[in-house]
Amino acid sequence: MSVLVGKKAPKFSAAAVVNGNEIISDFSLEQYIGKKDVILFFYPADFTFVCPTELIAFQEKLAEFEKRDVAVVGASTDQEFSHWKWLQTPKKEGGIQGVTYPLVADPANTITENYGVLAGNYEYNDDGEITFVGSAQAYRGLFLIDKEGVVRHQVVNDMPLGRSVEEAIRIVDALQFFRENGEVCPADWHKGDKAMAATQKGVSEYLASK
């Protein structure tokens, strides 16, 4: 697994479904540089079980991200046509109809591998040929990328373990609070809580107030 925190997010240009029904061939995160923070999350596959609960949960909280000026983008190793079909399928049939944020297609596994969340790996067989060993799907990786294109937070769950959208919002709030105020956010900090100066005195004062 790659640790990307503090580094520039890997660039890509790929097919994606946007607005729930439009396939474009050249989706890129570059459009957000200088404008928005980005939550980029990977999920294992379309038409599965935990995945629709996550994608719908992100949609249900999309307004919370948007009012924080944050773009939400999903990605998997499925083709864009699979994304499109899933987006047209009603929720009662296991679909994600109503999801409007972009879904990136990565059937070649390159984006997923560059972000370090590809389950399995490429190896040479006895004949010297490159083969893929494992499941060509993404773990549940989530990356918070700031307006400068730098990864500020990442978390990776195994496939059976669904993520907390509320935690994604909390970490966005923490980053934006630090950026705006210069104070750091202690354990379990939520928007509206007391933060602290990044000094020994700041830590001491904060702990004394608990």
Image (tube, grey):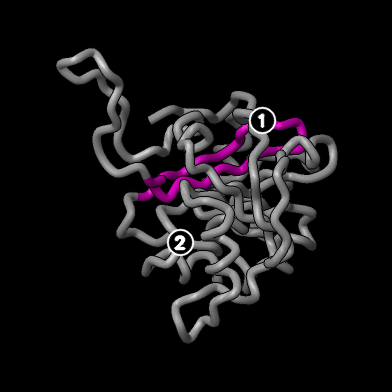
Counting from the top left corner in percent of width and height, residue 16 is at 65, 50
Q: Main secondary structure of the magenta part?
A: strand
Residue occupying the point 15% across, 16% down: 126
Q: Secondary structure at mark 1?
A: loop
Q: Which residues are magenta?
A: 137-157
* Magenta stretch contains residue 57: no
Please say if 178 is above or below 148: below
Residue 146 in view in this figure? yes
Residue tagged 1: 150
Q: From the viewer's perspective, tell me whether residue 128 is left or right of residue 156.
A: left
Name the kind of residue labelled 1 in the image.
Val
Nearest-to-viewer mark from 1 and 2: 2
Residue occupying the point 54% across, 77% down: 89
Q: Few, some or many C-alpha atoms within 10 Å of disc 1 (few <14, some 14-19, many ≥20)?
A: many
* Magenta stretch contains residue 141: yes
Residue occupying the point 66% across, 57% down: 17
Outermost top residue? 128
| Residue 66 vs residue 130, the one in the foreground | 130
Counting from the top left corner in percent of width and height, residue 177 is at 73, 47
